[in-house]
Structure formats: structure tokens, C-alpha cells
Image (cartoon, rainbow, N blue to C red):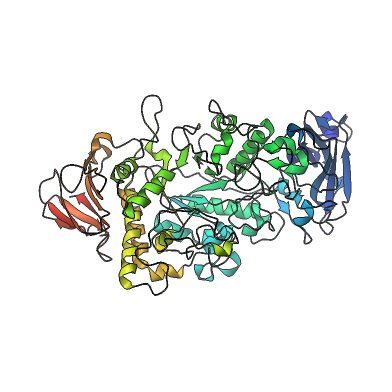
Amino acid sequence: MRDPELPMSWASSEGTPSPLGVTWVEEEHAYNFALYSKHAWRVSLLLYAEDDAVTPLFQYDLNHLRNKSGPVWHCRVRKDRVEAARYYAYRVSGPSPAAATEWHWFDFDKILLDPYAASVFFPESFERGAAAQPGSTAGKAPLGHLSACESRFDWANDRRPIHESDTVIYELHVRTFTMNPNSGVSEERRGTYRGIIEKIPYLKDLGITVVELMPVLQNDPQEGSHWGYMPLNFFAPHQRYAGSGPLCGQHDEFKEMVHALHQADIEVVTDVVYNHTAEGDAVGPVHSFRGIDNSNVMSRAEPGRYENFSGTGNTLNCANRAVRRLVLDSLRHWAHDMRVDGFRFDLASIFVRNSDGSINFDDPMLTADVMSDPGLEHLRLIAEPWDAAGLNQLGRSFPAHTWFQWNGRFRDDIRRFVRGEPGFVGALMSRLYGSADLFPDDREHAYHPYQSVNYVTSHDGFTLYDLVAYDKKRNWVNGHQNADGPSDDYSWNCGWEGDQNVPPEVVTLRKRQVKTFCTLLFLSNGTPMFRAGDEFLQTQHGNSNPYNQDNETTWLDWSRMTQYPDVHRFFKLAIAFRKAHPSLGRSRFWRDDVHWHGVGASTDLSYQSHSLAFHLRGRSQGDRDMYVMINSYWESLTFAVQAIPRGTWARVIDTAAESPNDFLSPGEEAVVTSTAYTVGPRSIVVLLEI
């Protein structure tokens, strides 16, 4: 602790403008507070006791001649002055709204959450609506936790896993993954970070190497959404996913989860939402960003109206330097303090928009900032390369050339081919090959096929089972007159809509279609991803957008693993097969190692074609050759196996066969003695060199 006889330093008396947020200064036993607000006229720091979230026990009115450096307001408070303090917030005043570039939203009556708060407290009287109305929000506003900045966690020689050709991404929601009582997770841990720890043996047995968590950023509990895509704060873990109460236990529980997954050799990627906040549109609540520096933080179409490239009412101004710093500081916090291994950036094309909403095609600053940060560049960075206003930059159009990208073209082309649409054989070839049309490896671009995150389903849209069980979405319960969610998921119900009184032959066809999707996903060059529960035919009963359904609609129904053990077995074997054959998922495109065929020697690219075969040589990868025959036609087709003498192939997969013959375990492959092989309707056969 500092010697009280020594003269007080400038930092001790005035505070420092960096780092932003609240920081524990150990040598002084003091808190440093720093808040960015370029246009504020007056800033007051408020500290609250644990038992009173209405009346602050301490107030510090910052003086711009003493407590302001550039656009940052700051001060330092010794802990012995505020021993009883547990929470903090701000009040900020400033000019009234003026032009579009000065559309301020200052209101000194509003209690404002620090955007850098590492943990958020919601008092019992918290009220979202009060922040959208005139008047004080004392006792009704979220507050920051002081003790979060003092948290320490023993990582015990934690090691970050790194996966390459064996990468299998599993998208899951922390709460829905284990919330169902039939999840097998202890009651007190259901729907929490620790619930995932209990499911690690399941993830390992399935073969998962990367979990991609839907957003875990702190949400507004009264906003109404459930998925997590309405963040109130970019530093605090969502406390509802923790079981240890409202203080700061969610930090330790999240870290416990990450540490346990790392111990199991599983990477942790988090879905992050840096394109908007939970404060909504111009009539939404003033919780934090809007009341602190609205004109800098939000993209404005005109006074009184935000740009809405996110589809949620507002858009963060990612071209602003303060917003870019906020995003980078948040990423560093999650990467360094919370030890996550990567990020999936929701609606990442918003990063390339200028302050006026136009598109920066030359050098978008936020993506450049992330790529040039030595503490972030080694992470698994994944873009959703579009926004909600129609901008789609999939492939080389997206400026972060080293990032992975969710490949929406893979999703759509595979769905349309499998449901039997004509004219998609060429597209299927491109997706299997690694989407070189989108990620070219010419001298100028030099992309890798693994940058394509291949998926058939994600949280957006139907589950894999619903994709083969519903032609029409059933989103009425979401409250938008069935107008929300994708208008066409390229689904096909296999001749029977929904789940009521389904004929056995339709159930058989649906399972075959699911196994076909699974096979194509894991045969394709690129990085495979699927959503949690698809491996046992999880259903949302046709709801393609249950963002606000925290109930059995979205909770994984683990009883379906018992109901459909053949599908679960198929997924498990398909993942193991991919890992055992590095010739499938490569750093580079297949090039001369692949030869394309049809039912005969030549590929049939005619509009009415529904068949494709290919011979993939594996010797360059220390692997065996494989021959794949694909038939999306509604009748059987006989393929002539090309190039290899009789007796050198063995069948591994035939999705038309009943389990366990649909996927033969290693050592049980069936030798093929004929060069003619009949592939059943809507099915795939995979042969392996022996």
C-alpha cells in the first residue's frame, strides 16, 4: 500500500483515463473509474450499498478541470472511503439534440450502466420501461459490480486446444442445451455454464472439438428475447447462466467451464454481437450507451431515427474510434481474461459501414484493427458475412481475408440439391470441393478451404429434423403473425407436413434425408458445423425463429436420443470417419486428387441431373482413396465405379440401408466385388479403398 507521507501523484488525485471502466489499483487500495463521453457537460459517479440500490452512499461530481482528459472522464476513490459500496453507476448531462451529427440523448435523471462494467446487477425493482419514460430511474436501473474488477481465478496451467483437419464445430445455447429435466444434468446446474461441464463426456463421445456458444454477453432480462442477440453490455457474462447468485460468480463459473472444456481438448468460441445494443430504437430505454454518448455510439439516419442495419432498432457506429476501442477491449477481455479461443461475429458486415451507413470497400477500420492486434490474430475468428439490410459479403468480398466465414451458399445449395431441385449438381461440386468460387486460392487471394464454415443448419431457421418435416414455418407463438423468420428455408417435408400421424415410410425417408445431409457435411472440404440436437433429430415443431421461446420449444429434448439411436450413431460415426481421413478436410483444395464422375465416367451437369460421383485420392495426405456416389433422384440409379480394379473397394456408408448397415464400423466394411453399384433413391454410398 502507498506510503501516506509521500506527495499524492496526479494519477492518485485525479484518476487516469485508461483503462476504461473500473479498475482495482492494488498498491493504493483504490478504484479507478474512467468513462468515455465526448459531449457530456457533467458527470457524476454514484456508489451504492448492497442493501440500497436507490440512494447512493457516495457521489463524486467530476470536474472537467481535474477529472477529464480529452473525451474521457475519470477519478480515483480509495476503498476505505467507500467500504460499504458494492455497485456503481453514472449520471450524465449534456447538450440537447441538434443536427443529425449531434443527436444527443442526455438525461441527468437516468442512472446509467458503465459500458465497461464487468458484471451487472439488476435490483429487484429493475424496470426496463422506466428507462424509456421521463423521470428518474433510481432503483430501477442496472448497476455495475465493483467487486468484479477484483476477481481472481486460478487457471492451473490452462492450455488452449488447437484443431485443424479434425475440427468439428457444435453450435449450442448455454441454457437450452441442458435446461430440460431429461438432460441428465443435476437440477441446480441445468441451463448453466456448469451444466455444460457435466455434458463434456457426451461432447467427447460424439467427437466435438469446438463448441460455438450462442451469445453469453449480459442481456436485459426484461427485453423479451432468449437467444442472447440483444446485449446490454459487452464485458459481463450473462448471469442467468450461472447458479451462484447475482454477485460475480458468473465470471468464475464461465472460467470453470472454459477450463474444463480445454482440459477435454475442446475449443471454446463465443458468438459476439457488436452491431447493436438492447436499448432498441428511438423510443427504447436509456440504460447505458444512449445516455452516455448517443451521437458517437449509434449510427443515425436522421435526428430521432437510428439506422437499423441490424434489424433490432439500432446499429452501433463501428466506424467511430471510441466504438472500435470498445469492441477491441471487449475482445481482449474475453480472449485474455476469460480465455475463449475464438469469436463468431454476428452480422459482421456492419463492421464495414461508415458512420452514414455507406460501405467502406477500401479499408474498414474495425476489421483492420482486429487483424492487426497481436493478442487476437491467433484466435479462431469467424464472420457472419452479411447484415440485416441486404449487404452480403460472403467470400472474397469480406475484408478480413484470414477469417473463417459462415458459408450460407453451402447451406442453401446443399438443401436445394438434397430436396431434389434440378440444376444443382454443379453447385454441389463446388460446395464439396471447398467453395473455391467464393474462397479462391489464386496468387492474389490465397484463401484456404477451411475458411468456409460449412453448415446445413444453425440457430437461424429450422432444425435439421424440421427441415425434412415441414414445408411451412409455424412461428405464430413468437407473436409476429408468423411473419418472422426466413420465408423459405428450402425445406421438404418428405410428403407429410409435421408430426401428427406420420406414416412409417415417411419417417424412414426423413431419417434417410437427415443422414444424407450429415454425410455431405462431413465429406465436404472446409470446416463442418452443426447445431446441438441435430444428431438426435431435435425438433422445434416447425418454429424457425424461436428467439423468445425459453421453454420446451427450444430446450433440447434428450429423450429423442433414445427415440432415434440410429441417427445419433450415424452422426457419431460420420464425425469419426472425417477425423480418420484427413484427405477430406485439408488446408488446400483437392485439385488433382479428385476426379468427378456421374453414373458413368462423365459428370452429368444437365439441368435435370440429380447424380454425382467422385474419386478422392488420399495418398498425398497419407490416407486411403474413397469413392462417393450421390443420388438425390427419387428412383434408384446404378453407378459404374470408375478407375479401380474389381475387389479393391469396401462399402462404409449407404444411407438407404437400415442401421447398423447404413454406416459400417471400422473393420466391418463390406467388400464390393462389382464395378456396378445400385444407389437407392435419395441416398449416398461411400466406398473406401482396401
Asked whether residue 184 appears in the rendered view, the answer is no
Q: Position of residue 565 (x, y in %)?
A: 36, 67
Image-based side of 671 in relation to 50, left or right = left
Relative to residue 666, is residue 71 depicted above or below?
above
Image-based side of 396 in relation to 287, left or right = left
Q: Quadrant of residue 453?
A: top left
At 18% from the left and 54% from the top, the residue drawn is 650
At 72% from the left and 52% from the top, the residue drawn is 120
Relative to residue 674, is residue 103 depicted above or below?
above
- Residue closest to the far bottom: 501
Q: Position of residue 518 (x, y in %)?
A: 35, 55
At 80% from the left and 38% from the top, the residue drawn is 28
Image-based side of 516 in relation to 212, left or right = left
Image-based side of 588 in relation to 672, left or right = right
Q: Quadrant of residue 304?
A: top right
Q: Position of residue 273 (x, y in %)?
A: 60, 45
Of 378 and 344, the residue lying toward us: 344
Asked whether residue 86 appears in the rendered view, the answer is yes
Q: Position of residue 181 (x, y in %)?
A: 54, 70
Please identify the quadrant where the N terminus is shown.
top right
Of 602 and 613, the residue lying toward us: 602
Count the marks: how many?
0
Of 344 and 79, the residue lying toward us: 344
